[in-house]
Image (cartoon, rainbow, N blue to C red):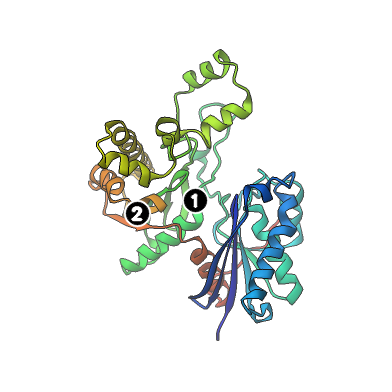
Amino acid sequence: MNYNILAINPGSTSTKIALYENDKEILCKSLEHSIEEIEKFNSIQDQFDMRKNKVITFLKSNGYDINKLSAVVGRGGMVPKVSSGAYKVNDIMVNRLKYNPVIEHASNLGALIAYEIANKIGIPAYIYDSVRVDEMIDLARISGMADIERTSTSHVLNSRATAMKVAKMYSKKYSEMNFVIAHLGGGISLSVYEKGRLVDIISDDEGPFSPERSGRVPCKSLIDLCYNKNFDKETMNKKLRGNGGIKSYLNTIDVREVEKMIEEGNEKAKLILEAMAYQVAKGIGELSTVLEGKVDVIIITGGIAYSDRVTSWIRNRVRFIAPVEIMPGENEMEALSQGTLRVLMGEEIAREYYE
């Protein structure tokens, strides 16, 4: 039986869509939204109709009949902690994402657009591997400050899908293996999977710096910076996310530009990029202790994993722990569709969402 799946992945200035027939990609497109277009709206939620209409218009203009679809899947948004895998989009989830999301984020629109399209033609809508997947063990939740509990926010969609691919490469089941995974993108997160469960993470604000995020910085110095410079909350948030990391040192967020600087003899650029790789390697070592060293495979993935320079720096520091597999790319559309296909084929069961 053929299953036709539409995957929708909203980002800050684009809405990516892809059509799959079973595991074959039929069409993939990033629908771009200009800054001027985005700035017309007061909130991300207000962008819903604009983004939904663009998706439908694009499909129609390419002669695709949505009545052929078997399911629609959206990027999982900022709902309170959920388990890994698929969830049916229901009215409870829709209301939560519309009126009380954990954080206002473009990914919240994924479920909403999927639900709207699916309802029109009487098929199911799903989310898959939300960024809010939280299966952490109790030990991992203790931060060291009673006011703050550690929670899980990571690049789980790509990380988990990549782990499944690597398990197949090793002729093993994903649920039988232990992985430490570093996702290297605009933000960097690390995760540890023990026999299929995401037991702990290093989020993008408590680990390595990245092209635009500061990551873990010395707390006392951060407090001094806030109070001594009288920076407001918005300014400090920008220093941590958007203007931090490589950008704060080299005024670029493009690793390819940094590598060009290095090739032209820029020693500072080499120091900064290698420092990022150094911190990623430290994070991998940190999470390896969660498994008491029983790591089957270390995976390096995400867009920056295309850089041989960065991945070799990391590999050289961590290969004593376990074999290292380089799996570049974010693979989000494939991960969404493949997860949904497993549900449609009865290989996985989609959960019901409850508050």
Locate residue 229: give its quadrant: top right
Position in image of residue 77 (x %, y %): 63, 53
* In this view, 327 is above or below 204: below
Please state if 13 lies on the left or on the right of 303 as rendered.
right
Using the numbered discs, state the Cα–Cα distance from disc 2 to disc 1 in whole angstroms: 17 Å
Label 2: few (<14), some or many (≥20) within 10 Å? some
Q: Is residue 111 above or below residue 287?
A: below
List the residue tagged with mark 2. 306
Quarter assignment of residue 329: bottom left
Give how far across and how far down residue 72 sits, in percent: 64, 70
Q: Nearer the viewer, residue 298 or 210?
A: 210
Q: Residues within 10 Å of mark 1 (few under 14, many from 20)?
A: many
Three-letter residue code for mark 1: His
Question: Tag 2, which secondary structure?
Answer: helix
Find numbered disc 1 in the image and state the secondary structure of the residue it sits on. Answer: loop
Q: Circle 1 sits on which residue?
A: 155
Q: Position of residue 216 (x, y in %)?
A: 45, 31
Say which amino acid is labelled 2. Answer: Tyr
Q: Which residue occupies 31% across, 39% down?
A: 261
